[in-house]
Image (cartoon, rainbow, N blue to C red):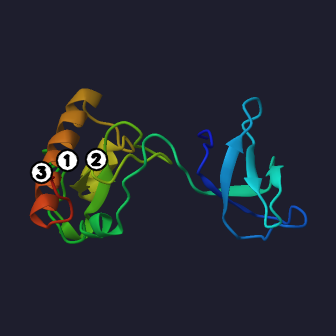
Amino acid sequence: MYELQVGAEITPTKPWFAGFNVGKKYKVVHVNKGSGNPKIVNDLGYRITISENYEVVSRRDKTMSVISKKIRNSARGQECQVRIPGVCNRNPETVVLAHVGKGSGMGQKCDDIHATYACSACHDVIDRRVRMGSANELLVYAYEGMVRTQKLLLEQELIKVAK
């Protein structure tokens, strides 16, 4: 679990007390240093510290995530860009956007621009659900696939480079 920061949004999952609405978004205005509990301003204007029964709606930290449904959906029907010899099934119907790099893996995703179009077989191998090859060798395939995918995303105008 990451630390909440000022500017993050949380919403009550259960009634707290007067001045709050379940499901409404509230911005964090302060985070208590010792406990890490967020402080928000309720609908009545009071600054209140919350310790439980909330979920994070959005986070605000030093590195905001790049998440794009268009980029994720663009993987449908594409060719696998990872292309691990003897593994790749070359079936565009199984291709998804597979995240690579720091922060990737079960429950942790890096930015969508740090991803590659991968068939189901190559995806299983680079995510290490199927064990084969050395980790370094698989990183090379994943990163080469990411570079090829980024080129395709540029061609599709789903990402742009400033001039």
Say the numbered circle drawn on residue 114.
Answer: 2
Amino acid carrying label 1: it is: Met
How many neighbours does mark 3 have within 10 angstroms: few (below 14), some (14-19), or many (20 or more)?
Answer: some
Does the CB distance between marks 2 and 1 fall below 8 Å? Answer: yes
How many neighbours does mark 1 have within 10 angstroms: few (below 14), some (14-19), or many (20 or more)?
Answer: many
Above or below for 7 versus 134: below
* Disc 1 target residue: 146
Residue 12, by quadrant, is bottom right
Q: Residue at x 36, y 54 (%)?
A: 66
Counting from the top left corner in percent of width and height, residue 26 is at 68, 61
Amino acid carrying label 3: it is: Arg
Can the viewer see residue 86?
no
For label 1, the SS is: helix
Residue at the right extreme?
17
Does the CB distance between marks 2 and 3 fall below 8 Å? Answer: no
Amino acid carrying label 2: it is: His
Q: Residue at x 42, y 42 (%)?
A: 63
* Disc 3 target residue: 148
Does the CB distance between marks 3 and 1 fall below 8 Å? Answer: yes
Residue 92, by quadrant, is bottom left
